[in-house]
Image: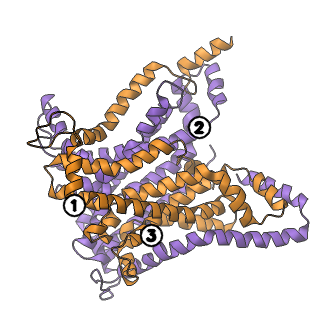
Amino acid sequence: MAVKAVTASTTVGIGKSAGWTRTIVLALVTLIALSPILVIFGLALRPRLYSDVTGPTLETFVYVIRNTDILVWLKNSLIVSVIASCLALFVAAPAGYVLSRARGGAVSLYSMLIFIIQSFPIVVFIIPLFIMLSRLGLVDTLAGVSIIYVASSVSVACWMMAAYFDGIPTDLEEAAWIDGCSMFGAFLRIVLPNSLPGILSTAIYGFLVAWNDYLVALVFLRTDSRFTLPVGLQTFFQQNQTDWGPVMACAVIMLAPPVIIFALLNRFFSIGGIGGSLAGR
Amino acid sequence: MAEAHAISEGRRLTRTSAASRAGAQTGRKATMIGLAMPSILLMALINAYPLGFALVQSVHNGGLLRLGKFIGFRNYLNVLTDPAFWSAASFTLLFTICGVFGSWLIGFGLAILLKPQFPGRNLFKVLLLLPWIVPIVVTSMSWNWLVATPGSLLPQLAETLGFGQILFLADPTMAMITVCLFKIWISYPFMMMMGAAALESIDNSVYEAATLDGANSRQQIRYIVLPMTARSTYISWILMTMFSVNDFATIYLLTGGGPVNATTSLIVLAYRSVFQDFLPGYGVAISFMMTIVLVALSLLLFRQVRKAKF
């Protein structure tokens, strides 16, 4: 009887398991969806023009490493993204805790401000920020760019942290309070250590936003040696539009870090929770 | 959530005396303010101050680094009477509608397909996120390679299949379609993640009960999944609207706003006014009007979502 119920749910239900047919369907869908990304690898591994090599080769990679500053750009991008990600976390973790636990008019206002700030396009901020940062001597520096990235990822980062904290029962902190722990102490010693997946998730998001940006880097970074990958790559692309091999080799280098991060840490990444969290607030 | 909070609050009351509770409440408030401080400072410095500055800029006629003369609302009036603004506004609308609902249909559909257990499920779940993870600078180049010139892969394929010569980026209508498809391709993973999280929040026993009652998959989606995930779905629509309207890179990197401005959205128009025509007041006025509509609309929708009972 029980067996019968299970087989029934495999054939009609959407909650239980499905069979190999679904594997095949999704393999096809994935292949189509990823074709623009597969193309990048195909072109990057193709031998260069007038080359003796036939079959896949890494010579385009050797070429771009020898002839461009790609390794410098890669280093700059990594620096900027790691700083931006850490700063975003530093700001968003406590803010998310406030969003998740505190109630009242001030908190609603605060929550609304975070939302409104997310609504403004970065184009509005850029010139005032340019003037502001140039007074501080931070234009054309990696530090200046990192700070702006925090501003563009902070809203979603706060929501992600809040969504994670929503899932942690308040009993934990309350027990700590009763044992004489201060509220801040409980946040630091009880809540944060229990939120590692949420923290990792938010850090990854902060990293992605910084890594993927184009506009801010384009406006703020002027010197070749301070370019991050998007600007460097785009400049290289405009100079070598027809020479796709080296361009795609650079592209592979640029897509590698976020893809590696996801390959290793995807178990921890969850952004979907912000839907339920925002709706409940 | 609020209820759970109230309950836990009540439990706390019984354990602590009234006097120490008053002290704890003040301390609690102070701590909350302290915890919110880094974000408030950051937003004041990086968002609020520049915003105020930009607002001032929008009522002046200066260049990039000079404020210029005060001209009142003339920038706004000029924007509103500019046909380029209205054509950009209508493309922004098209781009946003396609971006939101196109990516939702595909993303939510995939989330449903990926809900049950089957061989390779976890691998697909990760692989299908790639269009969102890989930087737009990179994917715009590969899309470019696929469609840009008549000799590219897709135009060649279309010609072989007998569709004739299709100019994906050179023909205004086709360019608009291509940019929208590009946006959907980039955004569906976000919707898939939102959808998957919403589906996770429905207990498996609900589907089992429905199955035992004889509901098929389509009925389950229509009468269980969609209503039970409605809140999260509306939120994801609001967020994606915001992301689409403010999306500069997707359009700019693929078409640059062309051909003949067919794919110029408001944000691209604002960028051009500021950085190519050096009319920051004009560009900022465009962004402000766009954002005011956006904020008003999303706050209204938010209210509806919160009030609604599903």
Chain identity of mark 3: A
Q: Which chain is purple?
A: B
Callout 1 amino acid: Thr
Q: Position of residue A111 (x, y in %)?
A: 59, 64
SS category of the residue bearing label 3: helix
Q: Position of residue B215 (x, y in %)?
A: 58, 22
For disc 3, the marked residue is: A147
Q: Are marks 3 and 1 on the same chain?
A: yes
Q: As displayed, is residue B50 above or below residue A116?
A: below
- Pointer 2 with pointer 1, Cβ within 8 A: no
Q: Residues within 10 Å of mark 1 (few under 14, many from 20)?
A: some
Q: Nearer the viewer, residue A145 or A69?
A: A69
Q: Nearer the viewer, residue A279 or B304?
A: A279
Q: Are marks 2 and 1 on the same chain?
A: no
For disc 2, the marked residue is: B200
Q: Quadrant of the C terminus of chain B?
A: top right
- Pointer 2 with pointer 3, Cβ within 8 A: no
- Colour of chain A as rendered: orange
Q: As displayed, is residue A177 above or below residue B55?
A: above
Tell me which residue sits at (22%, 71%) in the image: B276
Q: Quadrant of residue B281?
A: bottom left
SS category of the residue bearing label 2: helix
Residue A235 is tagged as: 1
Callout 2 amino acid: Glu
